Image: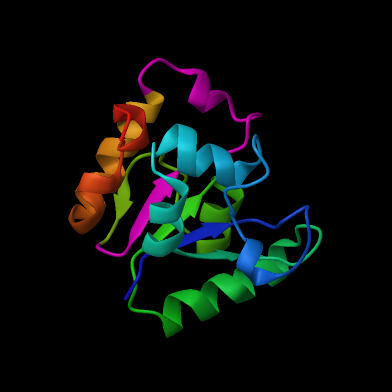
Amino acid sequence: MKPILVGESNPYGSDPYYALYPAPDGCSGHRLCCLILGMCRKDYLEAFDRVNLCEGPWKIGKARDRATELFAASPAKLLLCGQKVSTAFGVPFTPFQKHGESLLILPHPSGLCRLWAEAGSFDRARAAVAGFLPGLAELIGRSARGR
């Protein structure tokens, strides 16, 4: 079973295929794939399932309902992107840390999130994801290595 990247909502539309999609350049999915994880787009799309908690505007009630469904229905590991998503799952926002065996918290991948401006934040994210998903470790940072 593929790990699942969990985001808030997609401003580009409600088609679930485009949740955290790595295009257009500069969007949250692109930043997560190419800058933060340093993955090739093809590898990223094949390695992860991707979902948003809301269609359209963020609504915490709907987000909590969807988070409950995801957590209950899926034995997959979940990577929660951002404080709003962590809150919807009822877990503290502790970036780069696991909660139990099935949840990993990452800062929101948008360019507005100040945590990504901190020195070493991309390396911390890559190390956390590689430790959480050792089967994907060889793909993380791959585009940054020029492959």
x then y, percent, for residue 3: 36, 65
Q: Is residue 107 visible?
A: no
Rendered image coloring scheme: rainbow
Q: In the image, 137: left or right of 3?
A: left
Q: Is residue 92 above or below residue 135?
A: above
x then y, percent, for residue 59: 76, 62
Name the residue located 30 percent from the left edge and 42 percent from the top edge.
140
Name the residue located 58 percent from the left edge and 54 percent from the top edge.
20
Extreme residue toward the front, this view: 147
Viewer-proximal residue, 143 or 112? 143
Name the residue located 30 percent from the left edge and 38 percent from the top edge.
142
Q: Is residue 56 above or below residue 69?
A: above
Q: Which of the 4 quarters of the picture holds residue 1?
A: bottom left
Extreme residue toward the bottom, this view: 73
Q: Is residue 146 above or below residue 2?
A: above
Viewer-proximal residue, 20 or 101? 20
Extreme residue toward the top, this view: 119
Q: Is residue 9 visible?
A: yes
Q: Is residue 113 magenta?
A: yes
Q: In the image, 82: left or right of 136?
A: right
Q: Give the magenta-colored segment's residue range.
A: 101-120
x then y, percent, for residue 103: 35, 59
How many numbered circles does the render carry? 0
Would you say the magenta stretch is mainly helix, strand or loop? Answer: loop
